[in-house]
Amino acid sequence: MTRRGAGAVLAALLLGGALACSGGGDDPPGELIGDGDRYEATIRRTEGGVPHITGDTLGDVVFGQGYASGEDRACDLADQVLKIRGERALRLGPGEDGANVESDLAWRVLGVHERAVEDWPEVSDGVEELVTAFTAGWNAHLAEVGADGIDGWCRGEDWVEELEPVDVYAYARSVAVYASGVQLIPYITAAHPPGEEPPPLPGADEGGEGDGDAGDEGDAGDGTGAGGDEGARDEAAALLARPVASNGWAIGGDRSAAGGGMLVANPHFPWEGELRFWESHLTVPGELDAYGVQLSGLPGIGIGFNEDVAWTHTVSAGNRFTAYTLDLVPGKPTTYRYGDEEREMTSRDITIEYTDEDGEVREVTR
């Protein structure tokens, strides 16, 4: 993805329709939070714990949104940052059947975090403001309660630590490629030249046919021979074949009882784990008044409404890319045919760290 392309995707993902909002009203008092002279916001919780966040500027309310996100969903963002950095095996151990090792290797190959770090100095002012303010709010909550005081399954874990804005930006970019590059993860660590069998990954069951699990969250062995490769492909195919769809219903004013337009957003995203939506209300009096949901750990309103418009989006199982197969040259397992040419594959070593069962930090290279 080019820097311009990434910026456009991120702006749409983070901003949604929120910056087109206007209006706002007086809210009852709530909890006042701040970060020195940079940000100040008020968070008022209503039924169901929904945070209504008010501030004088966009930076203020997004700071408050990051703080409230940390209160409700700190583990979601901390875990996803660990994943895309390729540090799960280092901080959590190899995982069952080497799952964390495989995840780290695959995400290092994709290079989402690495590219985000390279591109961060050139992001638009709007994206930088949103991401920086949100991260400051998330960090402010963590600094106030500590890892031992957060609410969630990662309470007390030493890997729950202060984030940099580029970490949140990188996470947003990983979401932006969810329907494309992320779907290749089950194949990455399963790939090897025919006839070559790499050693089992740390944590894998060396007595089995495979050398680990096939993907970031899967549990099927990827193997080192034909049988293992088929297992990885089967898991990837099952993931891609999983029913995915959403509905968005728009009703014109002449069809509604009250005479106004209506929009029903019915996104079919997970109710647990990553990619969960989180509800909030953002208000800058006279400038912004938007209510809706965003993916947990990201700023802005992705699906929502204001006084004038409502917006939604849908997801489907349609392909966003086309895959081609290329024939290998007989006797040359890392050379393939391209038209009338023969081309050599290129390779690079990926090294990640993992913590073994004795607490020692070791390395593995593929």
Image: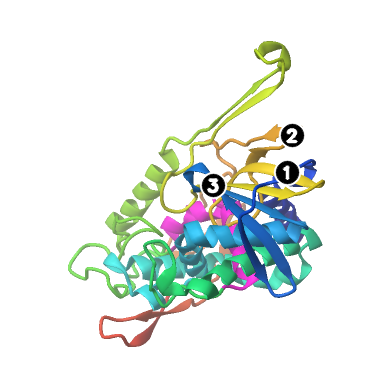
Q: Is residue 85 magenta?
A: no
Query: Label 1, on which residue?
Result: 289
67 w.r.t. 27: above or below: below
Residue occupying the point 69% across, 72% down = 118
Disc 1 to disc 2: CB gap under 8 Å: yes
How far apart are labels 1 and 2 at the CA level? 8 Å
Q: Which mark is residue 354?
A: none
The residue lying furthest to the left in this view is 207
What is the span of residues highlighted in magenta in the rendered image? 163-188
**Where does residue 363 sit, x and y in percent of width and height?**
39, 83
182 w.r.t. 25: above or below: below
Residue occupying the point 55% across, 56% down = 337
Name the element at disc 2.
loop
Q: Amino acid at mark 1?
A: Asp
- Left or right position of 218 against 13: left
Q: Amino acid at mark 2?
A: Glu
- 10 Å neighbourhood of mark 1: few (<14), some, or many (≥20)? many
Residue 327, can we see it? no
The residue lying furthest to the bottom in this view is 360
Q: Which picture quadrant has residue 197?
A: bottom left
Q: Amino acid at mark 3?
A: Val
Residue occupying the point 55% across, 55% down = 181
| Colour scheme of the picture | rainbow
How far apart are labels 3 and 2 at the CA level? 19 Å
Residue occupying the point 71% across, 15% down = 259
Q: Earlier in the sequence, mark 1 or mark 2?
A: 1
Residue 41, can we see it? yes
Query: Label 3, on which residue?
Result: 50
Query: Label 2, on which residue?
Result: 307
Which image quarter holds the N terminus?
A: bottom right
Which image quarter holds the C terminus?
A: bottom left
Disc 3 to disc 2: CB gap under 8 Å: no
